[in-house]
């Protein structure tokens, strides 16, 4: 659970400035600027800030669901049917929510992907740091024993 807390905190620290930047671009420059017109290909550019937030929230919720599924499997030697079913249901719900948001034009897909990508990158970074620390502890423990 320590990993989840770190990822949540660091993701929020990165996502909030991106939301602010998106909001400032929307208000000061506008998305109709020639250099930014391509963003309109991904949906309503005015929804960029909200889309980044929604992408981050859904990314964190998906991570928490994944951790729950893994923790449920650790107590058994085989994949419990209930855990597999709930994992597939979580994946289906995730896809359904994304499709509904895109079809109803409630998000900008690029902003949504930015929010999810921030969570993913922070997760990878924190997991690598945690593995490096555990590797140092393991090598330090083995050197001291005969």
Image: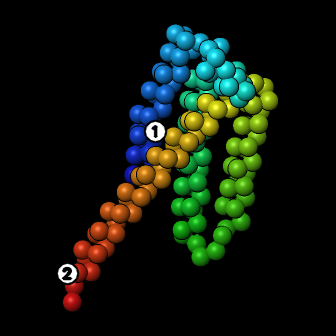
Question: Total marks drawn?
Answer: 2
Q: Is residue 26 left or right of residue 3?
A: right
**Residue at disc 2, secondary structure:** helix
Graded by Cα atoms within 10 Å as few (under 14), some (14 to 19) or many (20 or more), the crowding at tag 2 reads few
Q: Is residue 1 left or right of residue 136?
A: right
Q: Which residue is mark 2?
A: 144
Residue 25 placement (x, y as % from top left): 53, 16
At x 48%, y 53%, the residue is 124
Of all residues, the one furthest to the front in this rendering is 34
Q: Which residue is mark 1?
A: 11
Q: Give the answer, above or below, for where 51 lies relative to 33.
A: below
What separation in Å lies between label 2 and label 1 (alpha carbons)?
38 Å
Q: Is residue 97 left or right of residue 53?
A: right
Q: In terms of sequence position, does the residue under pointer 2 or pointer 1 come before the other?
A: 1
Of all residues, the one furthest to the bottom in this rendering is 146
Of all residues, the one furthest to the top in this rendering is 28
Q: Is residue 120 left or right of residue 136?
A: right
Residue 3 in view, yes or no: no
Q: Give the answer, above or below, for where 108 lies relative to 25.
A: below
Residue 66 placement (x, y as % from top left): 58, 54
- Badges 2 and 1: C-beta atoms under 8 Å apart? no
**Residue at disc 1, secondary structure:** helix
Residue 133 placement (x, y as % from top left): 32, 62
Q: Closest to the observer: 60 or 35?
A: 35
At x 23%, y 81%, the residue is 143
């Amino acid at each position: 659970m320590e990993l989840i807390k770190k990822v949540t905190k660091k993701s929020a620290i990165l996502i909030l400035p991106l939301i602010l930047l998106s909001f400032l671009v929307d208000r000061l420059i506008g998305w109709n600027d020639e250099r930014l017109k391509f963003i309109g290909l991904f949906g309503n550019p005015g929804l960029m800030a909200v889309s980044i937030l929604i992408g981050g929230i859904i990314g964190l919720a998906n991570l928490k669901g994944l951790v729950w599924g893994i923790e449920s499997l650790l107590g058994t030697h085989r994949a419990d049917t209930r855990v597999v079913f709930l994992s597939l249901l979580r994946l289906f719900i995730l896809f359904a929510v994304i499709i509904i948001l895109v079809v109803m034009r409630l998000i900008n897909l690029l902003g949504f992907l930015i929010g999810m990508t921030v969570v993913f990158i922070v997760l990878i970074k924190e997991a690598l740091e945690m593995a490096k620390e555990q590797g140092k502890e393991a090598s330090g423990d083995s050197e001291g024993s005969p």
